[in-house]
Image: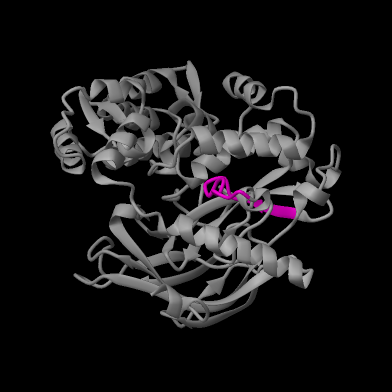
Amino acid sequence: MSIAVTVFGQNIPWKIQKEINLGEFAKAQQLISEYVHENKLPAGEKKILLFESDRLDRIRKDFTKSRSQILTELEKMLPGFSFDDLEKFEKDKSLEMKIIEGEKRYFKNAAPNLFRINKEMKKLKEEKLGVAVDRLNDFKKEIVHEIIAESKASGKNLASEENIKINYSLTVKPNAVPAGEMVKCWLPYPKENHPRQQRLKLITTSEEKYIIAPDSVLQRTIYMEKKAEKDSATKFSIEYEFTAFAEYNDIFSEGTIPSEDATVSEYLKERAPHIVFTDELKALSAKIIGDETKPLEKVKKIFTWINDNIPWASALEYSTIPNISEYCYENHHGDCGIKTLLFMTLARYNGIPVKWQSGWMLHPVEVNLHDWCEIYVKPYGWVPVDQSFGLLNSENEKGKYFYIGNTDPYHLIINDDYSQPLFPVKIFPRSETVDFQRGEVEWLGGNLYFDQWNYNMDVSYSKRESNEK
């Protein structure tokens, strides 16, 4: 097994990778076990191989549906339509499927995703069942113009102050950890070095002792421990409040992106495995940018192309995807983080300094995990770009492109980067190797994956609350 192939920027022996490529996961895992047992490997190489075995289990947990199950779901979603020919949807990648152990296994959310990804099927569903009300989009259009007006009236870039209280909990399922063993838990905790998040106050914690990561830690946590009890769930919770602000910057009128700036040069580089200037993405960039030379116009072009060509769809777990930006382009769909990493890759390739940001979207009409990014624009500094929120249906250009350079007050910032060490250091591989929004849990026996615990966020507001109920 001396010949190796590079996956996730790491070397995997070809004999093992061959079985993975064929979908023979059990054989690959057996080969990994034998290879690790029979060879005195450096600790780093051993860790890589053991995680690859774990990753195959994670893929199995994403691809849980059989053909009959998918057919049943699709027929319920669009009654009267014949779904006998699923192969055409598999071929155009609008129905996500893998061959695992010789059988077709479909992504657990493949059925609803079909009507998000495939334009023909989306249209058919809308014609038969009507267009679903998009409460979030309506809410965004309403508040965006309020934010712009308030910012212009005050002459300040921060507007629409909102006081928000959050109760967050993570609950490990009974007997996931043996009784008496210590459960270690990292919960997401807000960043404090951003003007649009102020006056953060921790109100309560489920455990008397806890460690809050320094704000300099790029993926911020609050850490707690608790012993597991037999037949009982192990719950960790926190409650905090803070003041959030929208941010408005008129970057297309007054902003410039520096061609050379040593302070942001790091954010122009490739960063394997998820930000790589592949030949395919270079060709895509040429198609999108054409002969445009103005940096901010390039930003608009990239943002618009992704908005028009990459529909939102429920995503695989990021830890299972070797190169997220490449996956997004090849499959032509993605969730907020997947679309953001494609934007970041194309932006960096075109000389636009860009970095990751993520946390939660706390809009009164929808609360969920969320990812976006920031670009560097003088004289404003780092300004937010939300590729997933995309273009708004507005006749006003400032409203249409609002989510380039601006944001509403409902973007909770937890992370200023991706794939960064947690504090205190986590011993075992993370459930989410890229993002950090739900939390992480482990014990002496290993990591606890997402199927072994649940999370919940309750949000309350001091403004708008009475109008949105």
How far from the left and from the top, in percent, is residue 157?
74, 65
**Range covered by the magenta-colored residues:** 382-395
Mark yes or no: residue 69 visible: yes
Q: Residue furthest front?
A: 395
Image position of 311 (left or right of 454) = right
Which residue is at a point 25% across and 27% down the rendered structure image? 100
Q: Name the residue located 64 percent from the left edge and 32 percent from the top edge.
A: 346
Question: Which quadrant, please, contains the C terminus?
Answer: bottom left
Residue 117 position within the rendered picture, expressed as x and y whole percent measured from the top left: 38, 35
Q: Nearer the viewer, residue 347 or 116?
A: 116
Residue 158 x %, y %:
71, 68
Counting from the top left corner in percent of width and height, residue 236 is at: 38, 72
Does 389 appear in magenta? yes
Residue 159, quarter of picture: bottom right
Vertical placement of residue 454 versus 275, above or below: below
- 3 above or below 335? above
Left or right of residue 330, residue 124 in this image: left
Q: Residue at x 35, y 24 (%)?
A: 20
Q: Main secondary structure of the magenta part?
A: loop
Judge by depth and name the residue closer to the eye, 386 or 355: 386
